[in-house]
Amino acid sequence: MAAILCENCSGQYHYTQVNQPLEISCMLLPIMLGKVFLDFFMLQVKQKNVKVSFMGYFCVSLALLDFTLLMSISFIFCFEDFALWGVRFTKYHICLFTQIISLTYGILHYPVYLVAGLDYYMTIAQTSQFPKRGQRLLYVFAVVVIWISGFFCILKGTSIYEELEIKNRFSPYQCPLSASVQSYSVSCAVVLLTGTALLACRKEVTTMLLSVRVASFASQPVLLFSYVSNNNSTCFKWQLLTRLLVCFLGTWAPFVLLQIIILFLGARIPAYMEMNVPWLYFVNSFLIAVAYWCRCHDVELTEEMWSTDPFVSWKFCFMPFNNENTEPADKPGAVIVIC
């Protein structure tokens, strides 16, 4: 890329271009450092005793790829101009690698969420916490195929190189990075569906929140909600939707608010920043809630069933708190959500 940028240039312009680094290069390093730290922090603080899933494997692969990109741009930033295996690397490759990663991340939202949604829809009723080895290998295979397909779609055509060449020719000291249309549409869909469900269940949610009180269970603060048993299928799904909303927003309300602010301001975040582990776990919880609601009658009320989400406890959306090792709740027919 450096050779392209300096082609047919005067000696003075060539000197200026080589010695004046890309302005964005100095910013990419701390940005990627913060993103990698956030990725591994989320992987560390999540619950460990959860069932393996496609999204869990993909989150790990994303964190590793971000770490690889961070190490690559750090190495190039430190040595500035060097040759490796016959290829000359300069600071312009920091921009090039980030642009390729950004474009690849931008086209993977739909396939990742589609596969994760199908995975939860088919396995949400499984009671085994540890799936067979073949299922684990299938998750690994799916993750590898998605990454290879994404990079192949970006790198196979010459249009990507022409686009990057035009962008960098007109902005020789900047690094134009595109936002993801897929991420924007998914964010709009999640906010719209959550808002619609909240609006439809506003009376039930208000009643439930007004009846909540704080209690202590196993030295942990818990929220005690009123619970009314109803065997009617339609009423059950309506009550379940209310509880799913409370559990989902109880954990991810700040993230939903952040998405609303971003959409309202029309902020365009580069794709390499948009796809991150916190965002994936946010969408992961949303997909799990949808799967629970769609297959609510297939869910078996067992302890192994509830270790699905690393951040949200969905157990008490389906049944009152019932544990033979604890004292009964203060009020019969109460549902407890641990915060």
Image (cartoon, rainbow, N blue to C red):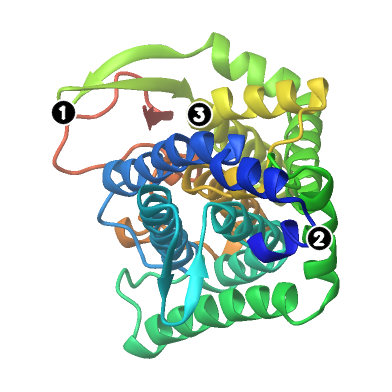
Farthest residue toward the bottom? 134
The three-letter code of the residue at mark 3 reads Tyr
Is residue 90 in view from this perspective? yes
Report the front residue among 88 and 201. 88
Establish if 261 lies above or below 184. Answer: above
Where does label 3 land, which residue? 227
Where does label 1 land, which residue? 218
Q: Nearer the viewer, mark 1 or mark 2?
A: 2
Could you say where residue 167 lies in the image, as x and y percent from the top left? Answer: 81, 51
Could you say where residue 34 lies in the image, as x and y percent from the top left? Answer: 41, 36
Could you say where residue 183 lies in the image, as x and y percent from the top left? Answer: 73, 48
Establish if 79 lies above or below 319. Answer: below
In primary-sequence order, the first of circles 1 and 3 is 1
Q: Nearer the viewer, mark 1 or mark 3?
A: 1
In primary-sequence order, the first of circles 3 and 2 is 2
Could you say where residue 139 lies in the image, as x and y percent from the top left? Answer: 46, 78
